[in-house]
Amino acid sequence: MISLNILDYSPIDEGVNSRGALLQTTELAKLAEDLGYKRFWVAEHHQVFSVAGSTPEMLMMHLASSTDTIRIGSGGVMLPHYSSFKVAENFRMLEALHPNRIDLGIGRSPSYRIVNKALNEEKGKRPSYEQQVTDLQKYFTDDTGEDHRYSSLIATPVIKTTPEMWVLGTGSGSAQIAADNGTAYAYAHFAKPSDTGVEIIANYRKHFHRSALLEKPNVMLAVFVVVAETAEEAEEIAKAFDLWLLFVESSHQPPYYPSIQTAKNRGLSSVEKEKVEKNRKRMIVGNPQQVKKEIERLSDLYQADEITIIPNVPGFQNRQRAIQFLAEALGLKSNK
């Protein structure tokens, strides 16, 4: 049976504010736990006014305290903006309070130029991303080997368990970093579906080096899903998702996630229609059985160990129903 996870952006629906969106994320995490999902991750987005998820560590602490067994993680922390040492201490603190339940997913998305500038203002020369990943591994394993520039430095609190560490990416570079450092790898199919994805993952497995963090390669595939009771209903929801993606990729994004009705009322230009057609390759749309079939096809194609769905659709009820439909279709074991 496929291990199924969720990545949630905390979308702000029309008529809902940021606090409301974060409380909905909390309820969705509780439901995911009851339904038998393995992981519930939250994202880091800056200058995207239609989602409330900007600081995953803070939200993770709340979610972990609001649930009991589901793994809580970041999808992900954009590591180049931060100190590896501080990230390690943040996640050790989370793991200390919620042992064997914390995942650190890391990425290196450059974000908007103004965001990158604000997060890195007046910083001097920074270590490479590859070095930062190696540093995290050092801090998570209490390695005091003399060959590290901070050899005697220990991340606190010192604990007996370790957060799971995942490198997120869409290309061969991130996969090689994960392989070299012996971490799990999450392929973001939703961000950049590519014909080379199968080869990227195969190379990760081939070149994986066993580490103190992970004995054998572990692959997660992340996909956008739009699922409803019928294919027709899913298509209506998907049109609002299409519009949201257009907004996010433009310089004129509203501070909310567009509703189905808003999408119906708004026409698309010929250029926008071309973008929508391209974006549709990033998502799975359909009824539960159709989406299940495509998830299973992608899982087999990529030889994925886990699938993470991103049910970033308008309307909290639609998000609840989406994860319920897939839990039932894929035979997840309920924790109720």
Image (spheres, rainbow, N blue to C red):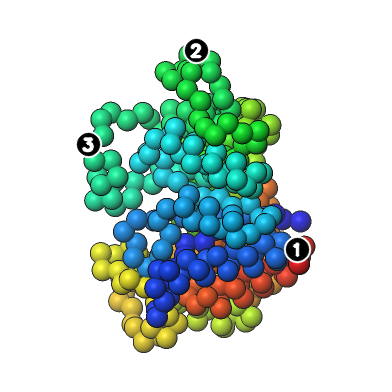
Figure quadrant of the N terminus: bottom right
Instruction: Name the spot of residue 296 as percent of width and height, x first.
Output: 68, 59
Query: Residue 182, relative to residue 321: is it above or below?
Result: above
Instruction: Give the residue displayed 36% in from the left and 87% down from the top.
Output: 265
Instruction: Give the residue displayed 40% in from the left and 56% down from the top.
Output: 54
Residue farthest toward the left in the current orientation of the protein: 122
Task: Name the mark on residue 122.
Answer: 3
Left or right, 7 with reference to 295: left
Instruction: Name the spot of residue 103 as percent of width and height, x first.
Output: 58, 45
Query: Residue 211, relative to residue 78: is it above or below?
Result: above
Q: How packed is label 3: few (under 14 Cα within 10 Å), some, or many (20 or more)?
A: few
- Asked whether residue 230 appears in the rendered view, the answer is yes
Q: Earlier in the sequence, mark 2 or mark 3?
A: 3
Query: Residue 275, relative to residue 89: is it above or below?
Result: below
- Amino acid, disc 3: Glu
Q: How packed is label 1: few (under 14 Cα within 10 Å), some, or many (20 or more)?
A: few
Q: Nearer the viewer, residue 182 or 73?
A: 73
Query: Residue 47, relative to residue 168: is it above or below?
Result: below
**CA gap, disc 2 and disc 3:** 30 Å
Instruction: Name the spot of residue 33 as percent of width and height, x first.
Output: 67, 62
> CB atoms at circles 1 and 2 under 8 Å apart?
no
**CA gap, disc 1 and disc 3:** 49 Å
For the residue labelled by badge 3, is the local secondary structure a helix, a strand or a loop?
Answer: loop
Task: Name the mark on residue 146.
Answer: 2
**CA gap, disc 1 and disc 2:** 46 Å
Left or right, 333 with reference to 43: right
Q: Earlier in the sequence, mark 1 or mark 3?
A: 3
Task: Name the mark on residue 95.
Answer: none
Q: Quadrant of residue 333?
A: bottom right
Which residue is denoted by mark 1 in the rendering?
A: 335
Instruction: Name the spot of residue 236 as percent of width and height, x first.
Output: 50, 81
